[in-house]
Amino acid sequence: MGQRGKFPLIVRVVATVGILTVTTGCGESVPSGAGRPEAASAGSVAFVCTLGYDDEPGRTVAVVDLATGRRSGSVSTGSLPSSAAVTPDGRYLLVTDQGDDHLAVVDTATDAVVARIPTGLEPDAVAVSPSGALALVANLDDDTVTPVNLRTLRAGRPIAVGARPDAVVIGARTALVADLEDNAVTPIDLATLRASPAIPVGVEPDAVALSPDGTTAVVADLGSDSVSPIDLATLRAAAPLAIGVGPTAVAVAPAGGASASTTASAVAWVATGDTLVPFDITSRRVGTPVPVGHLAEALAIAPGSTTAWVAGQDATLTEVNLAGGTTGRSIRVGGRPEAVVIAPAPR
């Protein structure tokens, strides 16, 4: 990432059960105070952001009603929106705007931007803690992570990590930051907000997600066509395993969907080209790829389900039945989708 201008940017997206990610679209903004569609009550709203290019930057996040399969509006957050996350209570949508070096905080009830919080240079990824009190923003161009207190909406002291951090995920006690140019992942202790020694993984780690029980992280290694499982107890990675060409996104769900316990076998779904490849975290076996029909940029899995939504380079958001291995609706969102996140049902 970081290479802009006439060439497309490569996306780095994280999506986990309950909090997923974004891509974008263009079009009219929903007026401030207009409110969220009724679909929000069922947790069936997706947000999609377009990063774009230096000479044609995106500025909006598309709002998609997954129940009806229609784009219901858009929110203007800032220049080059690159990633997004939603707080566990569904109250806030957080969007990193690379062109403005800030984190935009959107009230999901009104679609209004309620804060723009300064970050480091070129913020490229954001994750929210399970408690909803903390966000971590990975700053691609100054090798730092910015902690943000979501109760006060203020940024804390930057945390130095490795070179070109472009993905982040937060567990119960530890956060993990993918350092693209160091071929490593940096752990951050959430109690002290200090970085620990980096964990070597495959080449160009580009996305990371946690298992539902929080014991394992799965890293997508863009440059070595592999995934690297990390044991969160020991903070050690297993040897990289071949997964497919150019993995750019990963999302994890219980193998049995909504009926599965958090300790059941979990599957990481990895976007490689125009397919999703299943990786069983327990057995560490790679399954049969599922065709998507579009070149995938990002994906998210609806909470407690086996339905994925894949943002493609052709400006669409495509429904994929992971259990049946079939594709469903394709929703046009416009622009160049870069990340997708599904909001949980409001509490």
Image (spheres, rainbow, N blue to C red):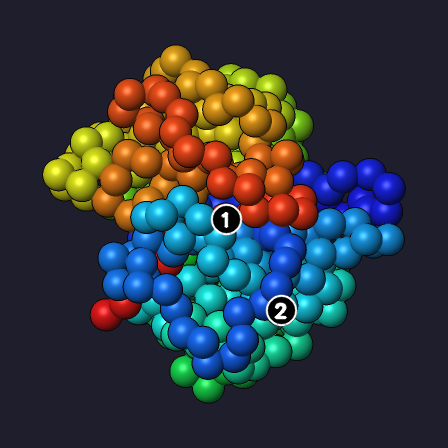
Badge 2 density bin: few <14, some 14–19, many ≥20, Cα 10 Å: many
The quadrant in which the N terminus is found is: top right
Can residue 184 be seen here?
no
Above or below — where is 241 with respect to 182?
above
In the shown orientation, is residue 134 left or right of residue 306?
right
The quadrant in which the C terminus is found is: bottom left
In the shown orientation, is residue 27 left or right of residue 79?
left
Above or below — where is 208 with respect to 277?
below
In the shown orientation, is residue 338 left or right of residue 94?
right
Above or below — where is 43 with respect to 310?
below
The quadrant holding residue 107 is bottom left
Looking at numbered disc 1 in the image, what kind of residue is underneath it? Val
Above or below — where is 246 with respect to 99?
above
Q: Which residue is mark 2?
A: 77
Q: Earlier in the sequence, mark 1 or mark 2?
A: 2
> What residue lies at 46% left-to-right and 86% top-to-bottom?
152
Q: Which residue is mark 1?
A: 340
State the image coordinates of residue 169 (x, y, percent, origin top left): 45, 52
Q: Identify the mark at residue 103; answer none if there is no mark.
A: none
Can residue 68 be seen here?
yes
Looking at numbered disc 2 in the image, what kind of residue is underneath it? Thr
Secondary structure of the residue carrying tag 1 is strand
In the shown orientation, is residue 59 left or right of residue 282?
right
Secondary structure of the residue carrying tag 2 is loop
> What residue lies at 27% left-to-right and 67% top-to-bottom?
346
State the image coordinates of residue 301 (x, y, percent, origin top left): 36, 41
